[in-house]
Image: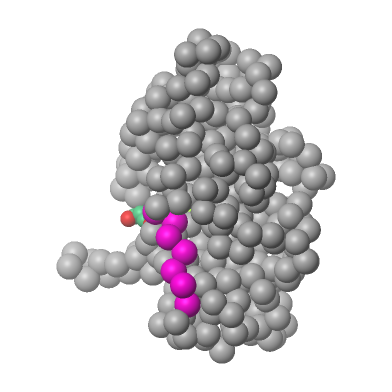
């Protein structure tokens, strides 16, 4: 049976490491990293994630500012709030929780965030920097995937990674991050011919399409490491459950290791957000960065204590 890669524990370890760095910054530099999170509307899942981001930010010693706006907030009001936060020297990281109500253009919102404070890594300047192999802020879910992979596999260089899904939030930035680790990267998607055959070539298989149970055991090479990014809510009440893109029952008989849903990539997303906020604060104050920018650098204890 496949080893389960425990994202919950690793996320806690990363938060603890970030907390140590925050304490050091606060005491030696008088800098308290500040994170501002904006929620527009009342989507229940988004409310949970935003609450958790604020709570975890405070737990690691950061200043946390939460702005909750009604679902009917005009776009110009949201842009005005972002402009205020851009100008606030006590705020080092800004994020707007997605999805947004349909009358708001997410592109306009993402463009409005100061790229230096864009801790989601969604601004085109950060997207471009990552694609070019530079040092811009990278998106949190792909960063979490690379940390989990490096913790389990150590060196990633030379491995063939197949990423299922080409979204802006996961698939594309993850391809850039894995290229940075010298993986051979294939991005597969809904138009890929013979998807199962492509997936069977992977040493590392990442499923990020939002289709429950898509990846079956016979799509996986024996011993491969499988990362399940999908989180779909099925059922109601007592029957309510979260399922990933991977059919865990069949895949765990073939794979070498697998991330669970829940408790895999999800918790790493918020821990990586805190790490990005710490990096952003250091950069804004011209201070050396806390350990390696690369999540797969095993030489630094902040990065992944398991490796
Ligand atoms: N501005 C952003 N919006 C969204 C992002 C993002 O990174 N930035 N990602 C997702 C939501 N998300 C964080 O915002 C997120 C999703 C899931 C989890 C998580 O811990 N999941 C748990 C299950 C939690 C549950 O019970 O619902 C798990 O997988 O174990 C954290 C953060 C979309 N929007
Ligand atoms: Mg996620």
Which image quadrant is residue 198 in? bottom right
In this picture, residue 252 sits left or right of residue 151? left
Residues 98 and 151: in front is 151
Q: Is residue 21 above or below residue 230?
A: above
Query: Residue at left 67%, top 39%?
Result: 293
- Residue 195's quadrant in the figure? bottom right
Q: Position of residue 156 (x, y in %)?
A: 70, 61
| Residue that appears at 55% across and 12% down | 29
Q: Which percent across, then down, holds residue 255?
A: 54, 79
Q: Quadrant of residue 120?
A: top right
81 or 210: nearer the viewer: 210
Based on the picture, tell me whether residue 4 belongs to the magenta stretch: yes
76 lies above or below 159:
above
Q: Quadrant of the C terminus?
A: bottom right
Residue 266 appears in the rendering: no
For the residue pair 14 and 141, the one nearer the viewer reads as: 14
- The percent coordinates of residue 126 (x first, y second) are 70, 37
In this figure, what is the number of numbered marks?
0
Magenta stretch: residue 22 in it? no
Where does the magenta region start and end? 2-8
Q: At which x and y percent is residue 83?
A: 57, 19
Q: How is the image coloured?
A: one colour
For the point 51% across and 10% down, the residue is 30
């Amino acid at each position: 049976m496949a080893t389960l890669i425990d994202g919950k524990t690793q996320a806690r370890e990363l938060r603890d490491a970030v907390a140590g760095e925050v304490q050091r910054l606060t005491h030696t530099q008088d800098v308290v990293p500040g994170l501002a999170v904006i929620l527009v509307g009342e989507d229940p899942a988004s409310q949970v994630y935003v609450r958790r981001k604020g709570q975890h930010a405070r737990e690691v010693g950061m200043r946390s500012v939460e702005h909750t706006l009604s679902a009917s907030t005009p776009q110009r009001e949201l842009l005005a709030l972002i402009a205020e936060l851009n100008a606030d020297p006590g705020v080092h990281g800004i994020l707007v929780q997605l999805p947004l109500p349909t009358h708001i253009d997410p592109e306009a919102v993402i463009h409005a965030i100061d790229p230096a404070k864009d801790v989601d890594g969604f601004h085109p300047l950060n997207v471009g920097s990552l694609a070019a192999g530079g040092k811009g802020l990278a998106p949190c879910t792909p960063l979490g995937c690379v940390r989990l992979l490096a913790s389990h596999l150590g060196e990633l260089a030379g491995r063939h990674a197949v990423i299922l899904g080409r979204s802006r939030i996961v698939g594309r930035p993850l391809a850039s991050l894995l290229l940075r680790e010298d993986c051979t990267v294939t991005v597969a998607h809904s138009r890929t011919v013979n998807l199962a055959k492509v997936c069977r070539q992977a040493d590392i298989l990442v499923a990020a399409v939002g289709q429950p149970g898509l990846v079956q055991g016979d799509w996986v090479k024996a011993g491969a490491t499988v990362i399940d990014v999908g989180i779909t809510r099925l059922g109601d009440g007592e029957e309510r459950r979260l399922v990933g893109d991977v059919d865990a029952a069949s895949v765990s008989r073939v794979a070498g290791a697998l991330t669970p849903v829940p408790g895999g990539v999800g918790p790493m997303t918020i821990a990586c957000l805190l790490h990005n906020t710490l990096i952003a604060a250091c950069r804004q104050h011209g201070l050396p960065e806390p350990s390696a920018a690369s999540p797969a650098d095993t030489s630094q204890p902040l990065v992944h204590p398991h490796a």
